[in-house]
Amino acid sequence: MIHELLEKVGAWIIMVEQSLGYPGIILLMAIESACIPLPSEIIMPFAGYLVYKGVFGLWEVAIAGAVGCVLGGWVAYWVGKYGGRPFVDKYGKYILLNPKDVQMAEDLFNKYGEIIAFVSRLLPVVRTFIALPAGMAKMNFLKFSIYSFLGSLPFCYFLAWVGMKMGENWRDLKVYFHQADIFIGVLILIGAIFWIRHHILFLKRS
């Protein structure tokens, strides 16, 4: 039953991307970031497959995915800011919000502060829900948007790049990404830390 549902969702995602192009990627990633758990393990790797086929450009796909994450995050941010926890507890079940996932995102935000809006976009599960506690905490909206974009870009790029490299075998990635989501998130996070550190050192030398 669940397997059949996932197959239907996957087929719909493919249809949207093929029909709408880059706006389709933006739409799908926006839905995921609005706390509705569409599998990015299908969205971005399939977009990468279309890069392999010459339909899309890799950076264009990554940027579209990151823009979608920001737009979807805006929806969840405003829900968190104006509806707060009571809204989530009352209506969350109707949009498939898992209370445990929301609580985990809220705990991380309370523990680490605003920087988690950036870091969480590189991590599994939390990336889908972090906008809610950011809104509840009334985090600066512009800063939230910038952090969301910067955190989402390497994640989207990585998934699309792997889908491009896998080519015709991109479908095999669904299982591996689902099982190794945490490992992937850690790798991307480490890469982002090294990239930021390198550029900070470069600016200091300049």
Image (spheres, helix red, strand yellow):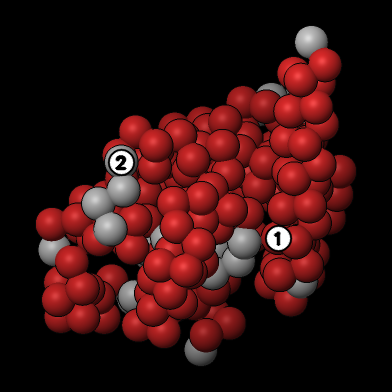
43 vs 182: above or below: above
Give me the residue at 61% from left, 26% from top.
Answer: 60
Instruction: Using the image as rendered, state which of residue 53 and residue 71 is in the foreground.
Output: 71
Crowdedness of circle 1 by 10 Å Cα count: few (<14), some, many (20+)? some
Furthest toward the top, the residue is: 206
Q: CA distance from mark 1 to mark 2?
A: 25 Å
2 vs 183: above or below: below
Left or right of 118, for residue 72: left
Crowdedness of circle 2 by 10 Å Cα count: few (<14), some, many (20+)? few
Give me the residue at 57% from left, 31% from top.
Answer: 63
Give me the residue at 71% from left, 70% from top.
Answer: 182
Element type at marker 1?
Answer: helix
Residue named by callout 1: 185
Image quarter of the C terminus? top right
Give me the residue at 56% from left, 37% from top.
Answer: 150
Residue 198: x %, y % from top left: 82, 31
Instruction: Using the image as rendered, state which of residue 164 and residue 189 is in the foreground.
Output: 189
Q: Which quadrant of the figure has residue 204?
A: top right
Q: Which quadrant of the figure has residue 23?
A: top left
- Residue 140: assigned label: 2
Residue 73: x %, y % from top left: 37, 49
Q: What amino acid type is highlighted by mark number 1?
A: Gly
Q: What amino acid type is highlighted by mark number 2?
A: Asn
Q: How many marks?
A: 2
Q: Nearer the viewer, mark 1 or mark 2?
A: 2
